[in-house]
Image (cartoon, rainbow, N blue to C red):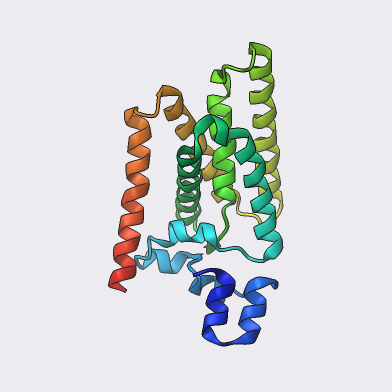
């Protein structure tokens, strides 16, 4: 159920307004599946993935959406839709795990997935056949610099989750390396299997809860 639809379903108009347009309270974000450290500690591993669908406010959602759109335009024709989505999901998972292990109390949003796309683009950029060597180097250096600047910004602004962003970027680098080895490589399928294992554990947790 979507964020606004969930609040409308409760029959509470103020929550519906907040869910669509306002700054979402921590309690609402937790109820929607946001990553809360103490809840993940208690076994809610599914939040490591579901938190990618939860955003603090409309601006947060639109910003991440625009970044995914831009990186999708760049990478989806080269990776394919399924692998592009897998990179995003693995990035969200990797960023969430790093944030959780770093002791971040709350971490929501799909920005770790966006950083994973940046990392994957850096890793696979040297093999894009339609570019010459100079263009490949320029692309890799440009994307790497962009990622570095955004990571520095994440550390400078307290409201941004630097741990999740760094974890997403590193996950993207590893995933990109797997893509360079080929979609059937052990590293690639190992990453996909890991993501599936956590998703399965989360589904069991939801059904059991």
All told, the count of numbered labels is 0
The C terminus - image quarter: bottom left
Residue 147 position, x and y percent, is 65, 37
Residue nearest the viewer, comparing 139 with 76: 76
For the point 63% across and 12% down, the residue is 133
Residue 186 higher or lower than 35, as above or below: above
Left or right of 138? Residue 169 is left
Residue nearest the viewer, comparing 101 with 141: 141
For the point 64% across and 12% down, the residue is 132
For the point 39% across and 29% down, the residue is 183
Q: Is residue 189 visible?
A: yes
Left or right of 208? Residue 183 is right
Residue 100 position, x and y percent, is 47, 56
Residue 152 higher or lower than 24, as above or below: above
Q: Please tell me in which quadrant of the rendered image residue 142 appears.
A: top right
Residue 173 position, x and y percent, is 51, 33
Name the residue at the top extreme: 133
Q: Is residue 158 visible?
A: no
Left or right of 131? Residue 168 is left
Residue nearest the viewer, comparing 16 with 29: 16
Left or right of 82? Residue 150 is right
């Amino acid at each position: 159920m979507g964020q606004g639809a969930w609040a409308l379903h409760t029959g509470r108009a103020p929550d519906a307004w907040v869910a669509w347009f306002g700054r979402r309270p921590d309690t609402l974000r937790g109820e929607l599946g946001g990553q809360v450290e103490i809840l993940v500690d208690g076994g809610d591993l599914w939040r490591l993935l579901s938190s990618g669908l939860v955003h603090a406010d409309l601006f947060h959602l639109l910003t991440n959406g625009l970044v995914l759109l831009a990186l999708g335009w760049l990478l989806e024709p080269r990776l394919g839709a399924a692998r592009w989505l897998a990179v995003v999901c693995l990035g969200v998972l990797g960023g969430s795990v790093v944030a959780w292990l770093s002791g971040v109390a709350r971490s929501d949003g799909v920005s770790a997935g966006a950083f994973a796309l940046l990392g994957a683009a850096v890793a696979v950029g040297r093999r894009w056949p339609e570019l010459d060597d100079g263009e490949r180097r320029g692309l890799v250096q440009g994307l790497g610099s962009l990622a570095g600047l955004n990571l520095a910004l994440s550390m400078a602004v307290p409201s941004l989750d630097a741990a999740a962003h760094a974890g997403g970027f590193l996950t993207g680098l590893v995933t990109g390396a797997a893509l360079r080895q080929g979609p059937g490589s052990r590293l690639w399928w190992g990453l996909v299997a890991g993501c599936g294992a956590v998703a399965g554990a989360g589904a069991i947790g939801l059904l059991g809860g």
